[in-house]
Image (cartoon, rainbow, N blue to C red):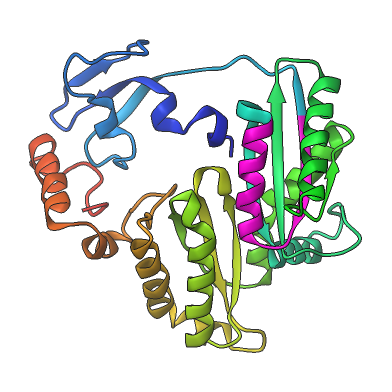
Amino acid sequence: MQVLRYGNARVLTLGLEVVLPSGDIWDGLRTLRKDNSGYNLKQLFIGAEGTLGVITGAVLKLFPKPAAKVVALVGLDSPRAGLALLEHLQSRCGERLNAFELMSAICMQLVLKHFPASPRVFETGYAQYALIELTDTEDQAALQRRVEGALEAAVAGGIARAFRLAADEAEARGYWSLRKNISDAQAAEGRNIKHDISLPIGCIADFLDETDALLRQAFPGVRMVTFGHLGDGNLHYNVAHPPGEDEAAFMAKQPEVTRIVHDSVHRYGGSIAAEHGIGQYKRGEILRYKSPLEMELMRALKRTLDPQGIMNPGKVL
C-alpha cells in the first residue's frame, strides 16, 4: 500500500538467486543500484509466478524508519475529486505522501455493517473516501502542521468536503482498519465478482464513469464495490449482486461481467492483472488483450528456460 513512495517489488529488488529448470542455480544476489552490463535477468523471474524458475533468495532495497507519521481520512464527492486531492497533496507535500487509498461509499457502509466496532469518523456520509498516510524525517508537529494546512486548503478550494487527522497511533490503526477490512466485509455480505486492475492514473475517473454505466445498463441494480491504491493506479473493482437477486444466479453471469470490465480496462490502456498475476484463471484472458507478438515472446522465453514445462505447469501460458 506504500508503492506510491517506495515503489513496488520490482523496483525494490536489487538481486535474486534462482533455481532454474535445469537444476542450475543462478546467483544474481547483487546490491548494485546501477548495472547495465547486459540483460536485466532478475526482471524475467519477478512476476513470472514460478514458471521460469524458483526464487530462493533476494536482495531488497530498504529505507530508514520515518521519524514522523500522519494518517488522515478525507471525505470526497467523487473519484475525480480524489485525483484532484492526490495532485494537490503531491504538490504541497511532495514525497512525504506514501499512501493514498480510495474507497467508495459502499465500501465504508459494508465495513461499518460487518465490523460494528470500526471508528465512525464522520457524522455524515460521502460518495468517496481517501485514506492518506504521510511520513517524514522531520518532527511530528511539523509534519502534522504541513498536512493539516494542505487539507484545509483542499477543503477551502472545493477539492475535499471534510477531513480528520488521526490523533495517535491507535486512532491511525483504526482508520487503516476501515480500508483493510473491506475484503472481509465483502465476504460477509456475500460473493462478488472480483477484478484486480491497473489504469493510467489520469484515466481512472473516466474509466469508473464509463464502466459503472455499462454494468448498470447490462445488470440493473448491480453494486460496484470499488477501492484501491489510487496513488499507483491499482483498483480492486468488485461487482456485487443487486439486493434481492439470487447470489448463485448472479455469479453465473461472471463471464459477461468480467468481459465488460476487462474490455473497458483494455480501452483505457490498463492491465487486467495488477497485483495478483495471471495464474490459471486469466490464462485465456491474456490471449484476448496481449498482442500475438507479446504472447510469442513469452512462449519463446518459456521454451528456452523450461523446455520440458516442469515449472508451475498450467500457469500464465
Residue under the point 86% across and 52% down: 119
Count all numbered tags in the image, as a single digit.
0
Image vertical order of residue 210 relative to residue 148, above or below: below
To which quarter of the image does residue 100 belong? top right
Whether residue 32 is situated above or below residue 208 in the rendered picture: above
The stretch of residues the image draws in magenta is 70-92
Residue 148, x across and y down, in percent:
83, 35
Front in this rendered view, residue 213 or 295: 213
Main secondary structure type of the part rendered in magenta: helix
156 part of magenta stretch: no
Q: Position of residue 84 (x, y in %)?
A: 63, 50
Residue at coordinates 57% horizontally, 17% vertically from top-left?
A: 63
Vertical position of residue 133 compared to residue 215: above or below: above
Instruction: Give me the residue at 17% from left, 33% from top.
Output: 21
Residue 300 in sight: yes
Residue 276 position within the rendered picture, expressed as x and y whole percent measured from the top left: 43, 49
Q: Residue 14 falls in which quadrant of the image?
A: top left
Q: Is residue 194 visible?
A: no
Please indicate whether residue 63 sits to the left or right of residue 210 in the image.
right
Q: Position of residue 255 (x, y in %)?
A: 38, 77
| Left or right: 173, with 305 as reference point | right
Magenta-drawn stretch contains 73? yes
Q: Residue furthest top?
A: 31
Q: Is residue 279 left or right of residue 218?
A: left
Which quadrant: the N terminus? Answer: top right
Seen from the viewer's position, the closer of residues 305 and 85 is 85
